[in-house]
Image (cartoon, coloured by chain):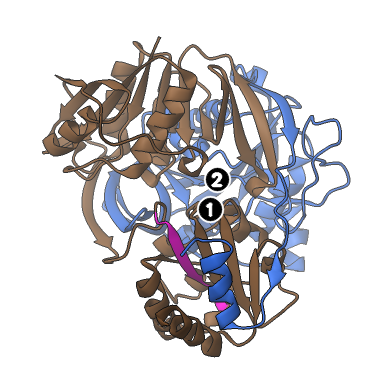
Amino acid sequence: MALLVIAEHDGAGIKQATLCTVAAAAKIGGEIHVLVAGHNAAGAAQAATRIAGVSKVLHADAPQLGEFLAENVAALIVGLAKSYSHVLAPATSNGKDVMPRAAALLDSQQISEIVSVESPDTFVRPIYAGNALATVQSSDAIKVITVRTTGFDAVSAEGGSAVIESVVAPADSGLSTFVGREVSKSERPELTSARIVVSGGRGMGSGEAFKLLEPLADKLGAAMGASRAAVDAGYVPNDWQVGQTGKIVAPDLYIAIGISGAIQHLAGMKDSKVIVAINKDEEAPIFQVADYGLVGDLFQLVPQVVEELNK
Amino acid sequence: MKALVSIKRVVDYNVKVRVKSDGTGVETANVKMSMNPFDEIAVEEALRLREAGTVTEVVAVSCGPLACQETLRTALALGADRAILVQTDEELQPLAVSKLLKAVADKEAPQIFIVGKQAIDDDSNQTGQMLAALTGWSQATFASKLKIADGKAEVTREVDGGLATIRISLPAIITTDLRLNEPRYVTLPNIMKAKKKPLDTLTPEALGVDVKPRLKTLKVVEPSKRKAGAKVADAAALVDKLRNEAKVI
């Protein structure tokens, strides 16, 4: 039995999400292969050979794979999948886009966002915004899985010595063309893999007010996030959203500032190791999950916290 | 141009769900049910395309038990022209739903099929992509902006790291993200009007689709509860706790 992991990468290197997905594959057991699909992604393929526990890297390099368009990548996966018992990808926006398309073409009922492996055919996944955990058993010959990366500790990016095998990409589907990308530039760590996250909510009151959080994030080396309310209000970009339908994070420290703690937000951060809440409403639901709560005006308290950190 | 939208009847967004004590699932008896919020956005987008003159007819489709008629009536009250229920009491998983929707798409031949990106009950995020696979059509998931011109759809998608824009050929499957639009409210006169709009019923058997579930749910449990911690007096106390008690900074 061999398992295929679809790599999340940036052409030059492998993303942390891939390492968590390899960890999930290792829990299932079997020989682990990694597919690096992209254009001019030799660096990523090389990096993938060094991932602990990986025995082979399949490298598909073609212009039509460059932007990871679902039609082209799913066709590639389907062509390879027949040799595997399991095909796994991280539940990133790429993984969520491509995997169900591949699963349907394989006539397999995908298992989305697993957080635990019980046996090679049985997995645990959150439902109802994480308010329930379902244990499900698949009867499909090829199991197609997306992995919630916060559920698995990343394997080491070093130590492996896999071989690279080139694979041919199917021709461009002609259905979809890439137009452009607006990337939110940031010097800060990536939200989903940061050790510390500083998030703001509706209580910030404006996009301008998020500047108040920057010294705190800078001091802690933290990524910045936001609640859906803050994103919907246009304070910050959409990819900052933490929650059921945004990013799922589980950092060592999550600092929720001016966030009331709606169910859908809690679904995205309640597995954080330590949660701090700063809110003026002492009845706010966020305090029911916070390890440390600070009640008061965030516009006064946040600078005070920064000052204390500088001491 | 015809637009299809799929809608799912789910436990209302505001209901705090309870896991059944026998571990077989979540309590849905006597619980308020509503249209999946992402599907409301799908209906709204189709209506706006019709109002802009791009689309001439909006057809709402739902798969599930007879009670889904209510949800379809809501779609009709919002402004959909007609509705189709694929009626079954079988537990439907995303692959089965996408096969049913594919069969409906074959009959209706829409140019655009708008689907919510995710249902807030099973949180699968699969049906639109699977429907695109089975029809062989293009897909644009997690849409936050949609423009249709010259036989193509230009879609801005919410992705990790920001936004990505793609141009796809029609017919196409679009899945909606939160910021695509703000759905309108149903008005009483429109609820009355909706009662007279056509609602057809089909069955999986008539469509020749096997909907047997592939995933068996062995058990459903409540996640371990996080305990509330303590309030601290001031910023100094907080930083002290983080440094010396939690040791995370």
- Left-right relation of A51 to B73: left
- CA–CA distance in space, label 2 to label 1: 8 Å
Residue B97 vs B50, above or below: the answer is above
Q: Could you tell me if the residues under marks 2 and 1 are in contact, i.e. CB atoms within 8 Å?
A: yes
The residue closer to the viewer here, B127 or B228, is B228
Local secondary structure at mark 2:
loop
Q: Give residue B122's quadrant in the image.
A: top right
* Magenta stretch bounds: A194-202
User: Which chain identifier belongs to the brown chain?
Assistant: A
The three-letter amino acid code for the residue at tag 1 is Thr
Name the amino acid, label 2.
Gln
In the rendering, which numbered label is found on residue A245?
1
- Which quadrant of the rendered structure holds the N terminus of chain A? top left
Name the residue located 56 percent from the left edge and 54 percent from the top edge: A273
Q: Looking at the image, which residue is at 23% across and 23% down?
A: A57
Q: Return the chain for callout 1.
A: A
Mark 2 belongs to which subunit? Answer: B
* Residue in the image at 57% along x and 59% along y: A274
Whether A199 is among the magenta residues is yes
**Is there any visible trace of residue B79 in the rendered image?**
no
Magenta segment: does it hold A237?
Answer: no
Residue displayed at 52% across by 40% down: A151
Q: Secondary structure at mark 1?
A: loop
Q: Can you tell which chain is drawn blue?
A: B
Q: Residue A143 — which label? A: none
- Quadrant of the snapshot with the C terminus of chain A: bottom left
**Lateral position of residue A104 relative to residue A293, left or right:** left
